[in-house]
Amino acid sequence: MELDDLILVSVDDHVVEPPGMFDNHLSPEWKARAPRVARKKDGSDVWLFEGAQLPNIGLNAVVGRPAEEYGMEPTAYEQMRPGCYDVHERIRDMNANGVLASICFPSYPGFSGNLFARQEDKELARVMLQAYNDWHTDEWCGAYPGRFIPLALPVLWDVELAAEEVRRMARKGCHAVSFSQDPQPLGFPSLHSEHWDPFWKACAEEGTVVCIHIGSGAGMHFTSPDAPVDVMITTTPISIVNCAADLLWSQALKKFPVKVALSEGGIGWIPYFLERADYVFEHHHAWTHQEFGGKKPSEVFREHILTCFIDDPVGVKLRHEVGLDTILWECDYPHSDSTWPRAPERLVESLEGVPDAEIAKITHENAMREFRLDSFRQIPKEKCTVGALRAQSPDVDLEVRSIRGGAPPTGDPSRPVTTADVTQQLMDAFSTPVE
């Protein structure tokens, strides 16, 4: 398949929420308590909510910047590409990258909406979470039908309300909900608890995919303060294996025909994981009392789990061992792992020798089926290709530009940046006062 003929649907991108996002979704009595943007003395912008500062971290919005300027320092809106927070510019950046449609995970609320879940005032939390979901579906996704897959935040603190919100959002056409890879460190029951049954049941009945993003549990995992930060960056995607094991050996997948996407987790590790799961079942189920209804764990995994990759040549080579119908592609705009604006060029390197029918599954058909995306009803299929989309926005500036005006790289260039350096940057980001 020629590069320009690809149709790309990304199941993992991110939105940096714009100021004023709550204006159209809250009644007057709640607007005064809504999250708001403020400028800090260091020139960065933060969200303020119930006394907490929520900075936009640099690595979360670095597309278009030189890699030497990456870091964990807080940033301001004018230091980001407008496509991070402006939906009209996002579409232009998607066109320039040849991407038809996108799922956009949240930024300041956390991947699973834990900002709202940890509020003591649960009525406030419910109102703000629903307002967020309405903004995301009606304004961000609704601005360009066929170009986005809506993604709801979950009501983590009340499972009955969580099920109700899944159903409410499904009525609005949203069939994806974010969730935590490990809710227990957040103060909630584990993935093995029957507590979540109403949530799983609602998702199964509504055809809502549960999207579990890396880092949606207790956050980043640092092996030691003096470890190079490269250790964390390397292992974070693969760490979703623990969630995959929790799900596979839990009762949830046995009780409910639900689909779960392991967002930004990569796919190269999955064949060994499935091989190991089948081995464990064969050797140990007699005493561990596991039962899969006559199936192997690997078969159950492929029935329920959607696997997602950004750039994974090994995984593509092993696509049949992963499960061809489970594989979805991601761009990760505007995070530091993103392949924007040359995602098609990077992807075709991995797809060399793959039959066209299999390429179509990986690049868009699996995603459109699982997330009920019907872009072709909104846009003629011939206008959904990489070549056609790029032709719509030929004037998008793709030049790498310095934002800091030539600031030096993070840390001491004579040694690797460590997790202690990154931790200090994060502490500084939260401690600088607001103007």
Image: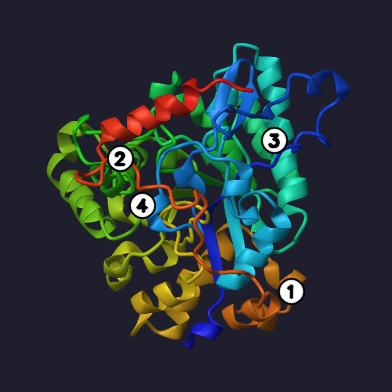
Mark 2 and mark 4 lie on one chain; the one further toward the N terminus is 4
Q: Which sits earlier in the primary sequence, circle 3 or circle 1?
A: 3
Which disc, if any, is residue 379? 1
Q: CA distance from mark 3 to mark 1?
A: 27 Å
Q: Residue at coordinates 35% horizontally, 56% vertically from top-left?
A: 266
**Could you tell me which residue is drawn at 60 percent across and 11 percent down?**
120
Labelled disc at residue 216: none
How far apart are the alpha carbons under marks 3 and 2?
Answer: 36 Å
Give the SS element for disc 3. Answer: helix
SS for dot 4? helix
Residue at the far left in the pictured view: 283
* x 61%, y 15%: residue: 51
Q: Nearer the viewer, mark 3 or mark 1?
A: 3
Which of marks 1 and 2 precedes in the sequence?
1
Quadrant holding the C terminus:
top right
Q: Nearer the viewer, mark 1 or mark 4?
A: 1
User: Distance from label 2 to label 4 (Cα)?
Assistant: 42 Å
Q: Position of residue 165 (x, y in %)?
A: 67, 33
Q: Amino acid at mark 2?
A: Gly
Label 2 crowd bin: few (<14), some (14–19), many (20+), radius 10 Å: some
Specify the amino acid type for callout 3.
Answer: Tyr
State which tag comes first along the sequence, 3 or 2. 3
How far is the residue under mark 1 from the one under mark 4? 34 Å
Q: Which residue is mark 4?
A: 301
Label placed on residue 411: 2
